[in-house]
Image (cartoon, helix red, strand yellow):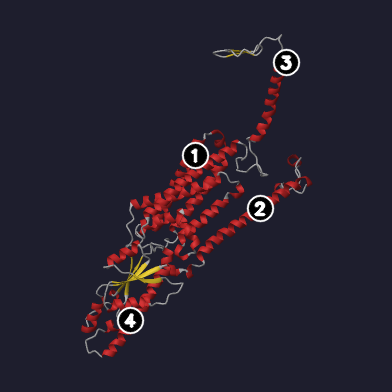
């Protein structure tokens, strides 16, 4: 019975209240509806721009794969090296495949692996002595291993997704195509010479093959999303805390000194970044595991702290940036900087700029990209650009700290003048409610009193007569008599 009564009119509680359809409430409802439509249009804009940026970075990557260069390295110097190099370079180039180039100046397989790890995407290496081993097998019939002829050198740690989609398939396809063509050529040459040597059939029919070496392995299951979604989880957790700080800190801006406010916010954000990044490093340790790949770099306590402090730098830079906007944006626009910050940073981790239009090269400066490069180097040792990445993060933290300093000053000034309220609404908004009076109103109320006081003094001065006692202003050295004009000289 009680559940049915709550919907009915209750005189004790509803007395004096009006219905939602009351004519006196219509102007307010119209203003609210217009405001909600404005919020909805703003949300449409954010979705459209955010998804356009994301899809724009992805949809052309299959047609821009030729921006990636992979190399063929001849360490043999014999007929196998010459023929394989020519066949590889003659492969028809398409926009959906990386471009093959010849790499010279490398003298050993170890040097080739080191070069690919530090600078390249991948390489097809013709191993030293491949021609001599094949010639010996064809002439004497000895044992022969075709896989000793070539080595496919990969570096999955440079960019996992690009490696899986384009580099690895291109290396394998080229090696398979070259093996078949070279075998057919070898059989044709054998028939034309009609040699009676004790030829090894395996060497004749299958003269060359390959082995694969990943010099910077990062091809575990979590690799494509590890840093991107780890940083994202930390950043989104920080966003909720910072919005709470914005909505509950109005009294601080009224009562606390500017310098102390700046130091307080930077210290709080640094502590928040340290705590969230600690969870990031612990999660990486738990789900990746120290022994995910026997060929990978050893996971040590130093690795744990490197990932922790890298995450701290990334979250700190972006949190300073977002809080700079949060402090002075009204609630209707608070989500804007989050969308336009998160989308480019995510793209920079899961995409490859060689596979995106030139416009997206600005994402080299995003904290996610630089933090991702540091983590990939720590985990795999691939493509070391550590100095540049650390320098970018440190520079961004310094710049964002200065930007936050200005934002704190602006927020305090607007709060003290009654222009912005505790939630961040400005005086022009229908939702504005500030406990601080508007500074112009205070000046207008103060001005009539000062004018009245001045008018009273002037009227008193005009009524001075000889019969009144002289008005004397006394200071340390002289007196001034307003009746006689004595200036105390």
Which residue, given by chain and number where applicable, does mark 3 sit on?
463
- Identify the image quadrant of residue 198: bottom left
Label 3 or label 2, whichever lies nearer to me, is 3
Of the numbered discs in the image, which one, if any, rests on residue 262?
1
The Cα atoms of the two marked residues, 2 and 1, are separated by: 33 Å
Asked if 77 appears above or below 259 in the picture, the reply is below
Q: Earlier in the sequence, mark 4 or mark 1?
A: 4
- In front of the other: 69 or 286: 69
Total numbered labels: 4
Q: Residues within 10 Å of mark 2 (few under 14, many from 20)?
A: few
Residue 43 visible, this orientation: yes
Q: Earlier in the sequence, mark 3 or mark 2?
A: 2
Q: Residues within 10 Å of mark 4 (few under 14, many from 20)?
A: many
Q: Earlier in the sequence, mark 4 or mark 2?
A: 2
Q: Earlier in the sequence, mark 2 or mark 1?
A: 2
Where is residue 79 drawn, in percent x and y? Answer: 28, 79
Q: On the rendered structure, is 450 left or right of 213?
A: right
Label 3 or label 1, whichever lies nearer to me, is 3
- Identify the image quadrant of residue 435: top right
Q: Residue at x 34, y 55 (%)?
A: 299
Of the numbered discs in the image, which one, if any, rests on residue 182?
4
- In front of the other: 316 or 356: 356
């Amino acid at each position: 019975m009680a559940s049915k009564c709550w919907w009915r009119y209750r005189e004790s509680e509803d007395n004096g209240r009006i219905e939602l359809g009351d004519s006196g409430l219509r102007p307010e409802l119209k203003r609210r509806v217009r405001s909600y439509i404005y919020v909805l249009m703003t949300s449409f804009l954010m979705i459209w721009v955010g998804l356009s940026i994301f899809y724009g970075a992805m949809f052309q990557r299959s047609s821009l794969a030729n921006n990636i260069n992979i190399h063929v390295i001849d360490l043999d110097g014999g007929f196998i090296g010459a023929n394989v190099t020519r066949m590889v370079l003659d492969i028809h180039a398409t926009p959906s495949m990386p471009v093959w180039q010849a790499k010279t100046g490398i003298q050993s397989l170890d040097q080739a692996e080191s070069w690919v790890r530090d600078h390249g995407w991948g390489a097809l290496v013709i191993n030293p002595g491949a021609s001599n081993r094949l010639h010996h097998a064809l002439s004497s019939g000895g044992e022969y291993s075709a896989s000793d002829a070539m080595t496919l050198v990969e570096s999955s740690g440079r960019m996992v997704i690009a490696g899986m989609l384009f580099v690895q398939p291109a290396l394998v396809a080229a090696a398979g195509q070259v093996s078949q063509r070279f075998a057919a050529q070898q059989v044709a040459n054998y028939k034309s010479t009609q040699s009676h040597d004790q030829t090894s059939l395996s060497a004749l029919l299958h003269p060359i093959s390959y082995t694969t070496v990943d010099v910077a392995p990062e091809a575990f299951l979590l690799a494509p999303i590890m840093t991107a979604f780890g940083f994202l989880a930390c950043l989104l957790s920080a966003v909720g805390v910072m919005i709470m700080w914005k909505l509950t800190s109005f009294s601080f801006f009224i009562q606390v000194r500017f310098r102390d406010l700046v130091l307080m916010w930077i210290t709080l954000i640094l502590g928040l970044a340290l705590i969230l990044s600690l969870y990031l490093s612990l999660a990486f340790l738990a789900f990746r595991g120290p022994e995910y790949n026997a060929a990978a770099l050893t996971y040590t306590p130093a690795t744990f702290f490197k990932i922790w402090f890298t995450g701290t730098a990334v979250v700190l830079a972006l949190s300073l940036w977002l809080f700079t906007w949060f402090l002075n944006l009204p609630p209707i626009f608070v989500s804007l900087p989050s969308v336009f910050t998160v989308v480019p940073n995510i793209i920079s981790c899961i995409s490859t700029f060689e596979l995106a239009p030139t416009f997206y090269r600005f994402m080299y400066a995003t904290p996610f990209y630089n933090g991702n490069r540091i983590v990939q180097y720590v985990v795999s040792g691939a493509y070391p650009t550590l100095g540049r990445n650390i320098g970018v993060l440190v520079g961004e933290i310094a710049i964002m700290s200065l930007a936050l300093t200005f934002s704190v000053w602006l927020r305090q000034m607007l709060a003290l003048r009654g222009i912005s309220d505790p939630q961040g609404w400005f005086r022009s908004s229908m939702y504005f409610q500030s406990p601080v009076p508007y500074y112009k109103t205070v000046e207008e109320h103060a001005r009539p009193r000062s004018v009245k006081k001045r008018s009273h003094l002037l009227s008193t001065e005009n009524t001075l007569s000889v019969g009144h006692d002289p008005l004397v202003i006394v200071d340390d050295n002289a007196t001034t008599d307003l009746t006689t004009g004595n200036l105390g000289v």
